[in-house]
Amino acid sequence: MPTLAPVPHAPRKDRNEPSAVRGWLAVLAVTLGIFSLMTSELLPVGLLTPVGAALHVSEGTAALMVTVPGLVAAVSAPLVTVATGRFDRRLVLAVLIAIVGLANLASAFATGFAVVLAARFLIGISVGGFWSVAGGIALRLVPERHVTRATAVIFGGVETASVLGVPAGTFIGDLSGWRTAFAAVGGLGLVALTAMLFLMPKVPAGRTLTFGDLPKVWKGSAGVRIGIAMTFLVITGHFLAYTFVRPILQEDGVGHGMTGVLLMVFGVAGIAGNFIAGALVAKRLRQTVAGIAVLLAAAMPLLALVGDTTPTAAIVLVLWGLGYGAVPVAFQTWILDAAPGATEAASSLFVCAFNLSIALGALFGGFAVDGLATVSVLYIGAALALLTLLLVARRGAAPARA
């Protein structure tokens, strides 16, 4: 998932620089918060089948647990940032992560699907707001020379949640039930809340994003528009299929207890894909984005064609994981390179597009699963990934380094 650029501030005097040790403790607290936040958003991916069965809804309807927070997060990202612009950033982040913890606990004890959806709505507010506020928090926590690394660590929590948090949650669900998985993530959110309250200093509000910045960067950069369009295609295609990977694997004959293990394989491959892409984007950005599209477009149909045993499914999920794990760093780099003078506004557009795509992927995947066949989402997702190649090939619309 996506990294936000630090918010620019006036240079600090040395005597006012925060302590490196205390600053890094605060950074780790925020990282734990964003890990629990993103794990919360994507946790239902591995739990659709048991949640749907327990609450008497179809798997397509259960996918609303992914759609609702994605839609809400896309809207809340700029709204929460502007609305809380005058408040202490520690307080804002603490409130948002507290909502996540309590909402997950509410889901764990829910007796009906409506209660779960209400909790997912609250999680969506927290996801959008937390990303936007946390984007520049590293600059306020650590000395100037540590800002780049601290920002990378904070948003490493996003990617780690995407590729490891969800498999771990699924594994817990397989062992002890889906309610235990939600309760565990809720507890993790409350631990993150405690860490932020004790380890973070007060962070007075600084410069915030305004609504007027968004249309300016959109109209002023063809590279940003192309990057947003590619994000929409790839992320929508991925979540259209990945949201239903559990029922797909079970229909293929993969054992019930192996689903969490296979998603963990996907997660490890995703981390590898992130590091590989990080090494490539500096000089081969366009080729890296094209390679991501090809990997995703190949892996999804392959899962339908050869993923009928645990070993073959694992191999295909490694390919899929390599492709998806490379998405955040590659697409984020494209967006930020396309708008070097307006990185915060460009990043906010990226956050909105990313979360909206998660929601639409799960939504339309649900329609396809209920109206066509579960396996159909793999072919539709692959088609969307292939369309990305047409945008990558456009001349004059890519950042300079691409």
Image (cartoon, rainbow, N blue to C red):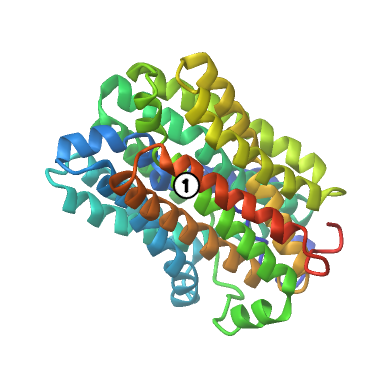
The residue at the point 33 percent across, 54 percent down is: 99
Coordinates of residue 110 in the picture (x, y in percent): 16, 44
How many numbered circles are shown? Answer: 1
- Compared with residue 22, is residue 298 higher up or lower down, i.e. above or below? above
Q: Residues within 10 Å of mark 1 (few under 14, many from 20)?
A: many
Residue 175: quarter of image: top left
Residue type at mark 1 is: Phe
- Compared with residue 357, is residue 188 higher up or lower down, i.e. above or below? above
- The residue indicated by pointer 1 is 239
Q: Nearer the viewer, residue 388 or 282?
A: 388
Please identify the residue farthest to the left as the structure is shown: 111
Q: Nearer the viewer, residue 339 or 301?
A: 301
Position of residue 187 in the picture relative to residue 210 (left or right) = left
Coordinates of residue 232 in the picture (x, y in percent): 56, 59
Position of residue 321 in the picture relative to residue 363 (left or right) = right
- Compared with residue 104, is residue 78 higher up or lower down, i.e. above or below? below
Coordinates of residue 235 in the picture (x, y in percent): 54, 52
Coordinates of residue 26 in the picture (x, y in percent): 57, 48
- Compared with residue 200, is residue 324 higher up or lower down, i.e. above or below? above
Query: Quadrant where the C terminus lies?
Result: bottom right
The residue at the point 25 percent across, 26 percent down is: 177
The residue at the point 77 percent across, 74 percent down is: 341
Q: Nearer the viewer, residue 379 or 290?
A: 379
Is residue 88 at all visible to an observer of this figure?
A: yes
Is residue 1 at all visible to an observer of this figure?
A: no
Q: Secondary structure at mark 1?
A: helix
